[in-house]
């Protein structure tokens, strides 16, 4: 399987997402610093938390809309609105306000609009990928998108570290340009993959009732809910790295000689940056190697083994202060991530019925947002619990997640077989 063999929509999506995510990666990871400096940490924290909850609501409504009016239309409209929101941010931060407080308020308001648009476009774009993929290329497609997403994040973070402080107004202009290019690509080059039925358009009087009816089907799907819950419990371990684990390492890890013969010393803050870089490098350079190694193995075995490696890696990271052990188990966690990702996406693709794909993916998108919330809760818990108890909590989360996913694995395999028979 080669990249050129993928559907044109997939190839365009990879390039569009890589470009826009790289520019976003230069800015977004550092915006908490910007808001804290100009609004104060307290107000910034409240407003950013509100952003998360509104994004959840938008994702639900976006999934509903994408199943009502089609993927492309909603996605294109969202991209153009994102462009205008970024343009307003660029204009606001380009003027010399007497106080940066005004510019920051405008910026966080536009960030809210951007977050809503992401909630609208995310389920639509995700459903489109499923629409145009096949059983033969789905794992490869998800491997490519996963690799491209991580490369974009790595490039964005690297550039942001050098450019964010001194060139923020210019970066906002660049962000607006990136969103405009994305809007053009989606509008004029992406083809529609799902035509809503005439009787299923959004002309109903009681939209809230219709949304409730749509999502009631999703929340009655026991297999899908367990699939989402199990994944949430395990994935949230990764979100401890920039939160609980970062705080723990900065407070408790003593300075160590990582390379004694070079006199290279490292402390808790340094090791965090090293671990994040290590994860990114492994994902970028080993993605296709790992895929090649496991391609002849059954998806179910690769899926569960990947989750076990991933969980064990982050559990050890949550406990150890030894630099060598931390580096070694980050390798294990990263390899586990590469193993489970493509099979997990394949299982996810066969769970929703065609007319509710975006709605299902909107619920699945909650995993990322809820993982952030779990990470924030764990920061609070760490203030009253010992590090050993925190690690025990992570072990319990991993075991429970693995039990849940193992219990539904036979049902997932049946759905994959059924989906392949339908395609054939």
Image: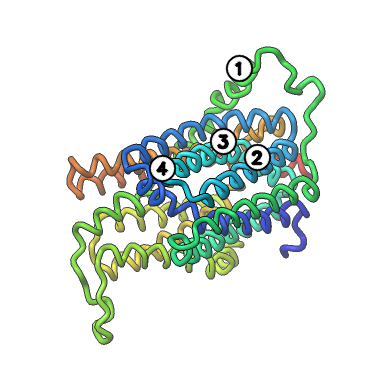
Who's the residue at 71% across and 30% down the image? Answer: 355
- Which mark is first along the chain, 2 or 4? 2
Mark 1 and mark 2: Cα distance apart in space = 23 Å
Label 4 – label 3 distance at C-alpha: 23 Å
The disc label shown at residue 101, or none:
4
Question: Which label's residue is closer to the chain start, 2 or 3?
Answer: 2
Foreground tag (1 vs 2): 2
Q: Which quarter of the rendered picture does the C terminus lie within?
A: top right
Q: Are marks 1 and 3 in contact (CB under 8 Å)?
A: no
Closer to the camera: disc 4 or disc 2? 4
Residue 144 in picture, x, y percent from top left: 63, 59
Residue of label 3: 116
Q: Are marks 1 and 2 in contact (CB under 8 Å)?
A: no
Is residue 108 visible to us here? Answer: yes
In the depicted view, which residue is nearer to us: 97 or 407?
A: 97
Does label 4 or label 3 sit earlier along the sequence? 4
User: Would you place residue 370 above or below residue 132 in this image?
Assistant: above
Q: Is residue 271 left or right of residue 233?
A: left
Residue 260, above or below 195: below
**Number of on-image labels:** 4
Report crowding for label 3: few under 14, some 14 to 19, many 20 or more residues within 10 A (C-alpha). many
Foreground disc of the pair 4, 1: 4
| N-terminal label among 1 and 3 | 3
Label at residue 81: 2
User: Tag 2 or tag 1, which sits nearer the N-term?
Assistant: 2
Q: Which mark is residue 208?
A: 1
The residue located at (76%, 63%) in the rendering is 4
Of mark 4 and mark 1, the one earlier in the sequence is 4
* Residue 338 seen by the camera: no
Quick one: SS at disc 1? helix
Residue lying at 30% horizontally and 55% vertically, measured from the top left:
246
């Amino acid at each position: 399987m080669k990249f050129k063999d993928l559907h044109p929509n997939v190839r365009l999506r990879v390039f569009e997402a890589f470009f826009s995510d790289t520019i976003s990666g230069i800015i977004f990871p550092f915006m908490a610093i910007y808001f804290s400096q100009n609004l104060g940490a307290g107000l910034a924290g409240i407003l950013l938390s509100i952003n998360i909850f509104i994004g959840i609501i938008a994702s639900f409504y976006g999934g509903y809309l994408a199943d009502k009016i089609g993927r492309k239309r909603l996605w294109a409209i969202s991209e153009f609105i994102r462009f205008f929101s970024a343009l307003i941010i660029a204009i606001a931060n380009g003027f010399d306000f007497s106080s940066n407080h005004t510019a920051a308020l405008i910026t966080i308001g536009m960030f809210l609009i951007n977050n809503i648009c992401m909630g609208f476009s995310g389920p639509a774009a995700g459903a489109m990928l499923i629409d145009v993929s096949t059983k033969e290329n789905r794992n490869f497609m998800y491997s490519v998108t996963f690799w491209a997403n991580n490369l974009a994040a790595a490039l964005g973070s690297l550039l942001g570290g050098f450019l964010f402080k001194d060139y923020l107004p210019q970066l906002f202009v660049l962000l607006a340009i990136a969103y405009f290019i994305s809007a053009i690509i989606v509008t004029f080059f992406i083809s529609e993959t799902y035509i809503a039925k005439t009787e299923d358009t959004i002309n109903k009087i009681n939209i809230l009732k219709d949304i409730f009816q749509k999502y009631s089907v999703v929340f009655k799907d026991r297999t899908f809910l367990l699939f989402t819950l199990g994944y949430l419990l395990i994935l949230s371990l990764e979100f401890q790295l920039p939160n609980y684990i970062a705080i723990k390492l900065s407070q408790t890890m003593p300075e160590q000689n990582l390379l004694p013969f070079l006199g290279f010393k490292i402390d808790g803050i340094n090791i965090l940056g090293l671990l994040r870089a290590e994860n990114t490098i492994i994902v970028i350079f080993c993605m296709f190697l790992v895929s090649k190694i496991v391609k002849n193995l059954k998806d179910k075995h690769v899926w569960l083994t990947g989750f076990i490696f991933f969980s064990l890696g982050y559990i050890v990271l949550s406990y150890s202060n030894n630099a060598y052990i931390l580096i070694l188990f980050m390798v294990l966690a990263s390899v586990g991530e590469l193993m489970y990702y493509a099979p997990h996406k394949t299982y996810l693709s066969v769970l929703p019925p065609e007319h509710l794909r975006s709605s299902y993916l909107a619920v699945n998108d909650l995993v990322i947002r809820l993982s952030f919330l779990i990470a924030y809760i764990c920061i609070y818990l760490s203030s009253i619990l010992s590090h050993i108890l925190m690690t025990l909590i992570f072990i319990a989360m991993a075991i429970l997640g693995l039990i849940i996913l193992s219990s539904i694995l036979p049902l997932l395999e049946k759905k994959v077989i059924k989906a392949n028979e339908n395609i054939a």
